[in-house]
Amino acid sequence: MLGLLNEQPLHGYELKKRLSETLGPLWGISFGSLYPALRRLERSGAITETVSEGDDGPAAPIVPTGSVKGDLAAALRRRPRSTRRTRKAYRLTDAGRELFIELLTAPETDDERSFALRLSFCRHLTGPERLSFLERRRTQLTQRLAPVRRTAPSRTVDRYTRSLLEHRAQTTQHDLEWIDELIAEERELVERTEEGAASA
Amino acid sequence: MLGLLNEQPLHGYELKKRLSETLGPLWGISFGSLYPALRRLERSGAITETVSEGDDGPAAPIVPTGSVKGDLAAALRRRPRSTRRTRKAYRLTDAGRELFIELLTAPETDDERSFALRLSFCRHLTGPERLSFLERRRTQLTQRLAPVRRTAPSRTVDRYTRSLLEHRAQTTQHDLEWIDELIAEERELVERTEEGAASA
DNA sequence: GTCATCATGTAAGCCGTTACATGATTGC
DNA sequence: GCAATCATGTAACGGCTTACATGATGAC
């Protein structure tokens, strides 16, 4: 939520829609969870209610009725609405922005979902911050791989569990290669930026 | 818990130890969650308290003290204990076994953890049950892959999110290949069993 | 006028976590 | 006797889910 609000003020309903469509099944959230969360954030001073001036929100989608002529007529008839009093848009405060960066770079729980969420918002970090974020993840993955190797060929687990563990090790290895790619790209970006700064 | 108790009666502490060591970080559980859960299961009739006759539990590990002679002496001194009144072992009832199978084959949430947990206990299923379990998983993975393909090259997401989605698609593809392997192996097993039954 | 969608919220319940409390057994 | 481990539990808290309640707006 903080990540989305860092880009532009939004109201709850829109917030949920964007979360669902971008993060998809990766990070679901229900209204019963979203609105209380917004209240908490407002109370703690991370966000404030804001008048959504000028912004009319996204155009209402035209639901196909099956009648081509009807749909066309509906499209022509559409025009911007004047007011929408029921919506409550929130924007991030300075404290909220600080909190956001803090959460993004916090000591991480070795959690897939958590990492995925952070990564999808890491564009808000500076190059070096992003780099250390990625490297921390790399360390975690390396550590996860370590105990798998040291375990003797355990015959205490059945074939399904064994297959599972093996597959997970492979996946982790794959993740590691991916992170290494990301890190390499990031290093290039950082260096290029420094060059630019030096030549300026 | 039901899965472990299906193999042998155990007490809470031991249950937690086994869960942690086999499933590892995949399925953590705390005592504050474990004991109430045992109570609930007992109330609902899935498990019953049992006298742990004969079973002395696993031998207490010898903690290395740094003194080789001391450790050796400790090992020699060890002998089975007579009674252990504080432990409460539970065993699965018939209703519990039924519940276990039901949970194992229930309509699944498209959840990594949930699938991993079920797979690591699916040895308790019959061949055909296991096969349909795996095929259900396969369907889920296929469905997850579908929307990725139909999406137009979206330029609304930043490079990190794009990379994330791409990587996830690859991982899903990899998972799919793995499941296909498991299914193929399972089919072989089932067929071989049927042959055996037919020739008998 | 009615239905779908947009939009915001509340209440009950579930379940997990951390932190705390207790006590037996064993090694030294 | 003291510390570590084994072993079982309780209490407070947090946060998410489902289900419910409400009401505005726009399409037809």
Image: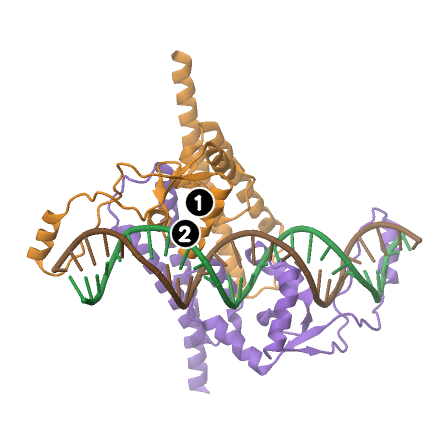
Chain colours: A orange, B purple, C green, D brown
Image: B189 above or below A154: below
In the displayed structure, would residue B114 be above or below residue A175? Answer: below
Subunit that carries the residue with mark 1: A
Q: Is residue A47 among the parts visible in the rendering?
A: yes
Q: Are marks 2 and 1 in contact (CB under 8 Å)?
A: yes
Left or right: where B51 falls relative to A182: right
Q: Position of residue B152 (x, y in %)?
A: 24, 46
- The quadrant in which residue A183 appears is top left
Which residue lies under the disc numbered 1? A117
Report helix, strand or loop for mark 2: helix
Q: Which quarter of the figure has residue B73?
A: bottom right
Q: Inspect this view and state whether residue A30 appears.
A: no
Q: Residue at x 41, y 76 (%)?
A: B191
Which residue is found at the position 68% from the left and 67% from the top? B12
Q: Position of residue B60 (x, y in %)?
A: 78, 61
Q: Establish if B66 lies above or below B7.
A: above
Q: Do tags 2 and 1 sit on the same chain?
A: yes
In x, y percent, where is residue A1? 42, 44
In this figure, which residue is indicated by the disc labeled 2?
Answer: A26
Name the N-terminal-most of marks 2 and 1: 2
**Subunit of mark 2?**
A
Left or right of B172, for residue A163:
right
Residue type at the position of mark 1? Leu
D6 or C15: which is nearer to us? C15
Q: Quadrant of the N terminus of chain B?
A: bottom right
